[in-house]
Image (cartoon, grey):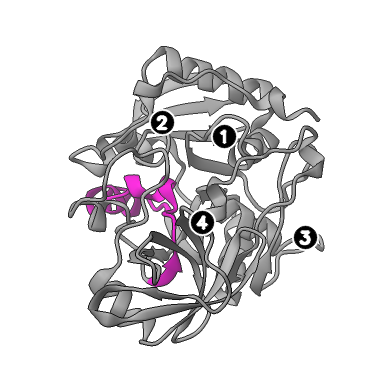
Amino acid sequence: MDRKAFHYDLPKELIAQIPLDERSASRLLVLEGGSLGDYQFSDLAQLLRSGDLLVLNDTRVIPARLYGHKPAGGKVEILLERVTGARTATAQLRASKNPRAGTALELADGASAYVLEKEGRFFELAFDTDLDPFIRAHGEVPLPPYIKRVAETQDKARYQTVYARMPGAVAAPTAGLHFDPILLDSLDKRSIKRAFLTLHIGAGTFTPVRTERVEDHRLHSEWFKVSEDLCDCIKKTKANGGRIIAVGTTTARALESAALNGLLHPHEGETTLFIYPGFQFRVVDAMITNFHLPESSLLMLVAAFAGRRPVLDAYRHAVAHRYRFFSYGDAMLVQP
């Protein structure tokens, strides 16, 4: 399948640069059986059914962007991809020239990070201080590359879901950013249940598909956990006629990764699952998702779920009706 089959034209001014004042005030485009409807995200409880189960990703974004300089004075930007130990991490580095193994990068408060090795796009770093308190004191919210501004105080709360609790992500599960306590309460009153899994989203989520053939692309690895309690809740929901609503592509990826052998089972570990058209979903019945970049793996996942043509038609509708796109943008409810 040709990568360009997932292209669409997006005016730059539709890329949301700041969040709305109210989380659930975002717009919601409903794609159901090929038909489109325009709603507000606050309408969600009325669009779902009693007995449905929302599955959400409770990962918490860490302040993963750090700044420092090389011994000769050159500036270095560090974007943590994954914290691998109390004082070690895998990271992307941005500098005029890649530092060599053994280079000490000078950070705030006299701390240092030592370059151990480079593998592909990533560097292995060792710090001379404990990472958790250091990044909490000096780290910056790792806003996506298409948000063309410096992170602000409001981003510490807004680039985070209200139910985030498991630190480890360097990008937010953006479909969940629209939920607020009032909306969650309205879902409860409608007997729409919710349950959680964890998938720590890496910066690789923004890596474009560069291969001409979609099938040749290799997706980055991410750590996830699907618990036994969640598996039991999903099985009970399905047995009672309810639907499993994945809140976000990361949730869908985790659930389907835990069911690759045909049956859903508890799992904790890495997934490299790349979902594109032709994939057979075993768990997810409907999906809430933000709008994704052209030719991206996330757009391909949504197209695998609802069909390439209906999804691209929905995206063209969203562009024509001036929806806001990407992380701080609006959302879709996809119900095949």
Residue 69: give x, y in percent of width and height. Answer: 36, 66
Instruction: Looking at the picture, tell me which residue is in the foreground, 210 or 298.
Output: 210
Question: Taking 63 as reference, is 104 left or right?
Answer: right
Mark 4 or 3, closer to the camera? 4
The amino acid beneath tag 4 is Lys
Mark 1 or 4, closer to the camera? 4
The amino acid beneath tag 2 is Phe
Question: Taking 21 as reference, is 60 left or right?
Answer: right
Count of numbered circles in the view: 4
Whole-angstrom CA distance, mark 2 to mark 3, is 31 Å
Mark 3 or 1, closer to the camera? 3
Whole-angstrom CA distance, mark 1 to mark 4, is 48 Å
Looking at marks 2 and 3 on the same chain, the residue that comes earlier in the sequence is marked by: 3
| Badge 3 element | loop
Assess disc 1: are there few (<14), some (14-19) or many (≥20) residues with their C-alpha within 10 Å of its C-alpha. some
Q: Which residue is mark 1?
A: 335
**What span is colored magenta in the figure?**
166-192
Whole-angstrom CA distance, mark 3 to mark 1, is 22 Å
Q: Which residue is mark 3?
A: 260
Whole-angstrom CA distance, mark 4 to mark 2, is 33 Å
Looking at marks 4 and 3 on the same chain, the residue that comes earlier in the sequence is marked by: 4
Assess disc 3: are there few (<14), some (14-19) or many (≥20) residues with their C-alpha within 10 Å of its C-alpha. some
Which residue does the image show at 48% across and 33% down from the upper left? Answer: 291
Q: Which residue is mark 2?
A: 325
State the mark number for residue 97: 4
